[in-house]
Image (cartoon, rainbow, N blue to C red):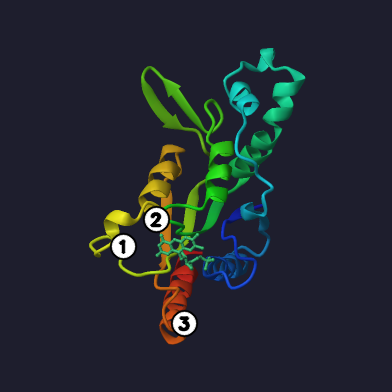
Amino acid sequence: MTLLLRINSSSRKSGSHSAAVADHFEACFRERHPDCRVITRNVADSSIPIISQKTIEGFYTPPEAMSAELLEATSLSDELICELQQADTLLIAAPIYNFTVPAALKAWIDQVVRMGHTFAYENGSFSGLARTRRAVVVCAYGAEGYLDGQPFAAANFVEPYLRFLLSFLGIKDIRFIAVQGTTADPKTVAAHIDAAKLECRQAA
Ligand SMILES: Cc1cc2nc3c(=O)[nH]c(=O)nc-3n(C[C@H](O)[C@H](O)[C@H](O)COP(=O)(O)O)c2cc1C
């Protein structure tokens, strides 16, 4: 069965453009894969804490030396990594916050990027261990001009960061769907949303 793992990271419970476009991707994906399963993580609900000292200790302790305390400190990471490893497609809905990803999304990333689980370091080089086949990232930007060749491209620390990170984990097929200008007038916003939804249909 095909699994879609969806990560929503907007702090907005209503009116989120990244979530609305990701909803559309999910609907198209369900149409294309009628027997699919979807796991949704709303990471902005504070369910994913910032990694602690014990979590980091657990990340670098060999399995046979793990104490009950370290097992507990890494259990959420285990669960999140298991979801990622089972997923055929990873869908991330991400707003740009102060030129980068929301802190809540970074908290999820810090739990799943883990040596020996989602990446390996051997003989001086890194390799990705993620079994996820592809990632689709819906990015919402309040302003416009963040894409390649546009005036604010140098201020976009969302797309280049996530593209590098996902590829570092070994995900080969990575697609970004941008919704720029979400703070513009309603007509402009509607046109941007429609264009992004069209891309979702093609990508699903
Ligand atoms: C804390 C915060 C920081 C933001 N920083 C930026 C920014 O750096 N650049 C930008 O274009 N828009 C910025 N915005 C606007 C959001 O990216 C925009 O409203 C986007 O649509 C939010 O995603 P959502 O609609 O999924 O909630 C910011 C919004 C918030 C709340």
Q: Nearer the viewer, mark 2 or mark 1?
A: 2
Q: Is residue 92 left or right of residue 39?
A: left
Q: Is residue 2 visible?
A: no
92 or 171: nearer the eye? 92
Q: Which structural element holds mark 2?
A: loop
Disc on the earlier residue, 2 or 1: 2
Q: Is residue 133 left or right of residue 31?
A: left
* Residue type for callout 2: Phe
* Residue type for callout 3: Ala
Q: Which residue is mark 2?
A: 99
User: Which labelled disc corresponds to residue 90?
Assistant: none
Q: Which residue is mark 3?
A: 190
Ligand 1 neighbours mark 2 (CB distance < 8 Å) = yes
- Marks 3 and 1, Cα distance to the nearest angstrom? 19 Å
Q: Which residue is mark 1?
A: 147
Q: Is residue 13 left or right of residue 133?
A: right
Q: Give x and y (percent) for residue 172.
A: 42, 45
Disc on the earlier residue, 2 or 3: 2
Q: Within the image, what quadrant is residue 117 found in?
A: top right
Q: Give x and y (percent) for residue 158.
A: 41, 53
